[in-house]
Image (tube, helix red, strand yellow):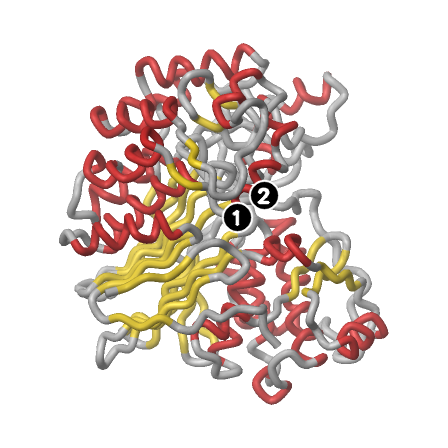
Amino acid sequence: MFFDSRRSTVHASNGMIATSQPLAAIAGLKVLFDGGNAIDACVAAAAVLNVVEPESTGIGGDMFALVRMADTKTVDSLNGSGRSGSGASIDELKSKGLNKIPDIGPYSISVPGTVHGWETILNKYGTMELKDVLKPAIGYAINGFPVSDIISYQWRSQVDKLNEYPSGNEFLINGQGPSEGSLVKLPTLGKTLQAIAEGGSEAFYTGPIARKIAQFVQQHGGWVTENDLESHHSDWDQAISTDYRGITCWECPPAGQGIVALEAMNIAEGFDISSMGSQSIETYHHMIESVRLSFADASQYVADPRVSDVPTDKLLSKKYANSRRELIDSKKALSNVTYGDVLKDGDTVYISCVDKDGNACSFINSIFTNFGSGMVVPDTGIVLQNRGSLFELDSNHLNALAPNKRPFHTIIPAMATKGDDLFLCYGIMGGYMQPQAHLQIVSNMVDHGMDVQKAVNALRFMVSPSGVFLEEGIDPLIVKSLKDMGHNIQLISGHARVGMGGAQVIKRDPESGVLSGGSEPRKDGCVVGW
C-alpha cells in the first residue's frame, strides 16, 4: 500500500541529484553539467533551498554531510553544527522559572554552522569555489522565485511566529505568507549571500554580519557573542556504521541521532522481517518496538562527544542489540519504554547526489522547526535556528546545557555500501522521523525487494512520545491489531502526512554505474539526472 503517487524510479548514468524542490535540484544538476562533482552540486542545491524553502533551512542553521569519494571508497562525516553561546547558563533559566528551554526566542539559539560547513566541505572535496555555487541562490533571492504548494502552506502557517519580532516582516508579504505560485523576492537574504560569495565564511562569522547577529541575539537576552561566531569551526569525524543483512549502513556520529537508526537496524536484524511481509501486522509491531527501544537509549546517552562520554561502541554492538531485542514480546507492545523530553517536530531539507565518477554526497541542512527561533536578524534575511532548545536543564544529563557545547541533533544524512561499492545515498528530512524512516526505507529495499521509488512511497509509521502515528490508507485490520497489542495508534491524513518525512534516495549499480533515484511524494521535490 503506497502513497498516491504517479512517480516511478528515475534512471541516469552521468549524474543524479534528488531534493525537495525542483529549482534546487536543477541548480545542482547544472553544476554537474558544468563539470562540478557531487559535493559542489549539493552545496549549490542547499543554498537554493535556503531561498526557496526558508522555513526549513538557511544560513542561520546547521548542516551535516557524508561524503564517499570513488577513489578512496571511504565514508567521511562532516559536522557543520554550531555550539551554544559562551554565556549559556542553566542557573539563569531556572532563576526565571523555566524548567525547559523555550522552543522559540533567544535562549533557543545556537551558533549557526551552515556557512562554515559549506566552505569546509568544498575546500576538502569540491572542485568549485563558494562564490560559484552560490550564484543560483543569489539569483532567486534577488530576482524572485515561485512558491511551491507545500512550502506555501507551511510558510502561511508560521505568520504568527514571524510576527513575534518586527524583522520577521522580511519573510512576509503585507503581513502574510505567500500563496502557491506567487513570485517572492528576498532581497536582504540575497545581499547576505552575495557578501558570503565575495568574502567566504569569514564574511559571515566576522565583521558587520556577525556583529548584527550577536547584537540582535544579545539585545533580546540570548547568549551568542561575536567571539562565539568568530571561534566557530566545523569538524570532520569518523562515520559510524553497522551491517544489516549484507549491506553496511553509515551515519554521522553523535551528537546526532543517526545512532538511533543503526541500533534499530541491529535490533530488527534479529527478526525475519522478510518472511513477515511488507505492511504486515508483524512487521509493523517488530519495527516499531525496535525504534522505541533505540530512541529510549538515545534520549539517555546521546550528547556532544567532545564534552560528554557517549557510549557509541556499546550502543552499536550486536551483543547489546541482542539484549534489547529480548525485551520485545511478539504479542504485545512494551509498556515501560520511556523517552526524554526532547522529541519535537522538525523541519529540514535533504539532498542526495551521485556524480558520473561515483562520488556521493549525502547532505542535510536545517534551522530545526519551521522558521527556527522565529528571530530574523534585521536587514540580513538570516533566520536563526532554535537547535539550542534541545538541551536539557538537568545538569546531570549528558545533553545538559553548557557553554560552547553542541546540542543533541536530529539531522542525519545516510549512506549504504555493499562490499567496496556504493549501494545507496539517502536521507529523510523531518525531525525525529529521520532515523525511523532510514530503517523503514532500507528494510523496504533489502527485506522486501522494493525498487527505490516504491521504497520511498510505502506507507510509514512514526514513533512519538504520545504514541505511534500511521498514515491513512493502511489496512484497518492492522490498526485494530496493533491497538489490541497495546500500541497507542493515531492515524494522520491530508497535509499532516508531510510530517512522515521527506526521503530522497539514489541507488548505484556497481557494474554499469547506472543511477536509480526516488523522491518523496509527500514533498514538492524531484530526482533529476542525465
Instruction: Name the residue located 58 percent from the left edge and 18 percent from the top edge.
Output: 165
Q: Name the residue under label 1.
A: 149
Q: Can residue 252 be seen in this view?
A: no
> Residue 219 appears in which quarter of the rendering?
top right
Q: Quadrant of residue 184?
A: top left
Quadrant (top left, top right, bottom left, bottom right) of the N terminus: bottom right
Comparing 132 with 420, the one in front is 132
* Coordinates of residue 132 in the picture (x, y in percent): 19, 38
Q: What residue type is labelled 2?
A: Tyr
**Which disc number belongs to residue 50?**
none
| Residue designated by label 2 | 153
Image x and y of residue 418, in percent: 34, 76
Is 372 drawn above or below residue 174 in the view shown?
A: below
**Secondary element at image label 2:** helix
| Disc 2 crowd, CA 10 A, few/some/many (<14, 14-19, 20+) | some
> Residue extending furthest right?
484
- The quarter of the image holding the C terminus is bottom left
